[in-house]
Amino acid sequence: MNQNFINRSFLDRGAAGDGGPLVNRAGEREGEQVKVRRALQAAALQAAALQAAFVGVLFFFGAVVEAAEPVEVPDPEAFRIVKRNSRDFRAIKGVFDSIIRAAKKGRADDIVAFFSERYLNSGRNRDDVRRQWKQILENFSDLELQHPIYHIERSGRFAKMKCEGVLMGKPRKPMRRETGDDLVVIDSWKFSVHYLVFEDGGWKILGDQIPYDTGRTFHPLF
């Protein structure tokens, strides 16, 4: 029974006689009391809902922050150029060669093994990497990577690789005007930077360590 119906029923009963004005005034007083009670109840419910929502938001963002705490990468001036004939240069370049070898064999888990446990890239984590690579492997075969490297820099256990690249593959279900033998571009980039970290005895892709979605394209090798 809604509030308007309650107030109206009292007024109608008073207008019918039998002490109408007194009953009407009593009805008005009772109607006002009903209004007050309902207003207080509504305010209490609203406050409880807001509190629950606030706690939920705190829990959600607290969980996100805890699960995706960024790694502190050294300042840019702390990095030094790595010589091309050095062991570090070959090892870091080898990460991407190994990923492509694993991709040719269709092994998504082997690919993800080259991504750090602390991987974070514009809010995305290793599970997102796995999902993306599974989609790539389901839709393409014979993957190839052209990956010219401009330079690699290192600071302690961290490294940065500036490069350009094209990731290509043969579509398993060719579109019109494509043949199953044509390589198509899956991803490409220019003047971009890979961030890596030395972890568990080898170099791993670290990501940009930004804990939120920046709106940038999610490149599968970054």
Image (tube, rainbow, N blue to C red):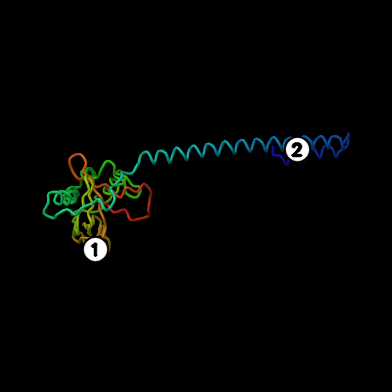
Horizontal arrangement in the rendering, residue 178 relative to residue 90 (left or right): right
Looking at the image, residue 110 lies above or below residue 33: below
Identify the image quadrant of residue 183: bottom left
Residue pictured at 27% horizontal, 53% vertical? 76
Look at the picture and state if 99 lies above or below 148: above
Q: Looking at the picture, how far across and down is residue 135, in whole percent?
A: 28, 50
Q: Mark 1 vs mark 2: which is more N-terminal?
A: 2
Residue projecting furthest to the right: 18
Where is residue 216? Give x, y as percent.
35, 55
**Residue beneath the point at 33% across and 44% down:** 70
CA gap between label 1 and label 2 equals 76 Å
User: In the image shown, does 219 or 141 lie closer to the viewer?
Assistant: 219
The kind of residue tagged 2 is Glu
Quarter placement of the N terminus: top right
- Element type where label 2 sits in the image: helix
Residue type highlighted by circle 1: Glu
Residue 178, label in figure: 1
Q: Residue under circle 2?
A: 32
Q: Which mark is residue 161?
A: none
Residue ranking furthest to the front: 77
